[in-house]
Amino acid sequence: MKAKLTKETLNNILPISVMYVEDEVLIARSVVTMLESKIKDVYVALNGEAGLEIFKKHRPQIVVTDIKMPVMDGLEMIEKIKGIEPATKFIVVSAYGETNYFIRAIELSVHGFILKPVDLNQLMEIIMELSNSLILQQKIQSKEEERKKAESARLTLEKQYAELHENMRDGSVRADLDGKIQNFNIAFQKMLGYSEEELYGKTTRDITPKKWHSFETDTVETQVKTNGYSELYEKEYIHRDGRIIPIECRTYLQKDENDEMVGYWGIVRDITSRKQSEEALKESEEQYRDLFENANDLIWLSDLDGKYVMVNRLFEDLLGYTKEELDGKQSIFAVAKEDRKKSIEFYQRTVNGESNEFISNVVRKDGERRVFWLKLRPINENGKVKFVQGMGRDMTLRKQAEEALQEQKVYFERLFESSPEAIVIAQNDGKILQINRTFSDMFGFTKEEAVGATMDDLISSGELLNEAQELTNQVAQGNDIEMEAKRKVKSGELIDVSILGRPIIVDGQQVAVYGIYRDITDRKKAEVKLKESYQSLQKLIQDTVNVLANVVELRDPYTAGHQHNVAQLGIAIAKEMDCSNDMIEGIRIGGTIHDIGKIKVPIRILNKSEMLTDNEWEQIKNHPVVGYELLKDLDFPWQVAKMVLQHHERFDGSGYPSGLKNGEILMEARILAVADVIEAMANDRPYRQSLGLEIALEEIEDNKGILYDPDVVENAVRILKSGSFEFIKKHT
């Protein structure tokens, strides 16, 4: 019958006809299915007789046939077909052991020989080669038909054998009884890498490692000479470059026309790739075994009855049992009694094809209880569950940590609730997630009222709302804030609070924010009272200083005006030097009364226009000491008495009364010293007129770093030359 053509429009369809004869239906169907996709006309027969009838009707160009078949065997069919159409190409399919049939096939001049099982690619390659010849024949048939018939008549058995011999994809080699190589095909030559001349001078032992010599001799004696052929066996050949090539081989006995043994014929296949695959598989199995034994989890395999088949090393280490002790035991035996029922249920589900995970208590050999995460999965073979694989991980420490974490959670929840400060946790957009009891008490809102509300809308309003929203945005952007402000309670009253805002970071991501509020209303009231008290004290100090200054003014108006000007310039210099507000205030007080010691100097000496005597000068120079003695017991917040004592000391130690120098002199006194000299020279004195501001500046600049602190001089010169300072009080 003819097979149906389904791809006749494809370009790769061969324009030939092929008949496949095979009595085994499954094999025939498999081969024909492949042929249909490659060849235009494909016919199939299940025995030689049916094949002969199909041939008579359709004249297929190539016949592929099995040998042994019912009704009529393949060789008989070939013989009859050749009687009908000698040009038909024949490919014989047979087993290695059918030696007589094979020889008969040669006698019938078949064009190809394929060993079972059929290699479809090899079959197609032979058909392709034959089809190329057929196509060529079709083109020149009209001119070459007589020549082909004559040439076909002259073909000898030897030539036909050579064709079959060379077309084989496996290596083919013939040797005499001494093993000397007589003939071989190209496949054999390529397999070993030798030239044709080199191979003809060798024996089969020359190309076989010594370890195989006795094996091969035994195979020839016990199989080939006895049965006429050997079973398929594996051995090795030596490549020309020294490499060892694994091969599989079947050897046939060769006889002459007198039935005398003349040699051996071997069909050889290079199995290097297969051996490499087997080695890779073996290595993979070893790697799996290594992973199995050294896994970080315990692993076991059990049968469908739950009995252990194998366990890994960690299983032994964690549970304390040896592999021998576990042999034949039920995998449920190590599970704690209270968890066995659950474990059996999960095991049964796994046997039914499901994977399962669960937590179970396990008892070690020494009685210690551990908590394990267990996973069971079915292992299938041929579509059915054959084994159950189990994995386990010791979760005891994690379980203990979780319990400890739960205890900490309870502790922190209680700490949160009992905190004396108001705490609120909110989303990044300000929506409240949780508040504590103090927050509720402080602001008057219940948890139900607060949770879900926007924090800023809840406790802020009016102008405060904008400020609160800005602070919330800052914290939402990952910033910390700490400040004091007013916030609104439920009744609408405003209270003073300190605010601490922080982002909540989990695994590097900001998930929420929290705020801590402390009611500082009472503290703010106390601060107001303290400020009022401080202001009263400041006024008292100022009044005291003014009284002292007025005492001097009543006795010597000039000195009083001079002191106020020195204080004014000293403050300006101190501000230019970025001194603290506290130091500036001290300079103001100290400058205002720095010459109070002159109260003990007779008025005639202070106003004398002639040259002073030594005794009079000593009285003048003593005024810093007198001022210090007057002020030292007054409890000023600043070192006013020392300022008064040191305002005539000089940077190089040439001043009076103590000859102090540089860092030994208070900074306030160094500032007042420069201000004192400038004011005295730039204004009128009782005994002379003003020398002018330029002369005063020349004096301090010429003695910068000698008599006067250089930093003080630079700042004083800067403000005076810029015109930003002017004396307010004029001498009287």
Image (tube, helix red, strand yellow):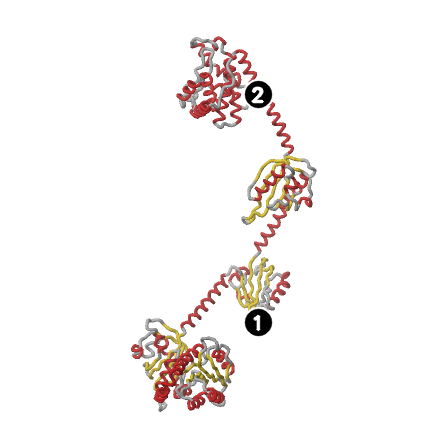
Residue found at the very far right of the displayed protein: 491
Disc 2 on helix, strand or loop? helix
Asked whether residue 653 is in view, the answer is no
Q: Residue at x 53, y 26 (%)?
A: 582
Q: Is residue 189 above or below residue 639?
A: below
Of circles 2 and 1, which is in front?
2
Disc 1 on helix, strand or loop? strand
Q: What kind of residue is marked 2? A: Ile
Q: What kind of residue is marked 1? A: Lys
Q: Which residue is mark 1?
A: 384
User: Which quadrant of the figure has residue 342?
Assistant: bottom right
Asked whether the residues under the numbered discs 2 and 1 touch, taking CB atoms below 8 Å apart as contact, a structural biologist would say no
Q: Residues within 10 Å of mark 1 (few under 14, many from 20)?
A: few
Q: Position of residue 705 (x, y in %)?
A: 40, 23
Q: Which residue is mark 2?
A: 541
- Marked residue nearer the N-terminal end (2 or 1): 1
Q: Position of residue 463 (x, y in %)?
A: 63, 36
Q: Is residue 156 above or below residue 341?
A: below
Q: Position of residue 291 (x, y in %)?
A: 49, 63
Of the pair 465 and 293, the residue shown nearer to us: 465
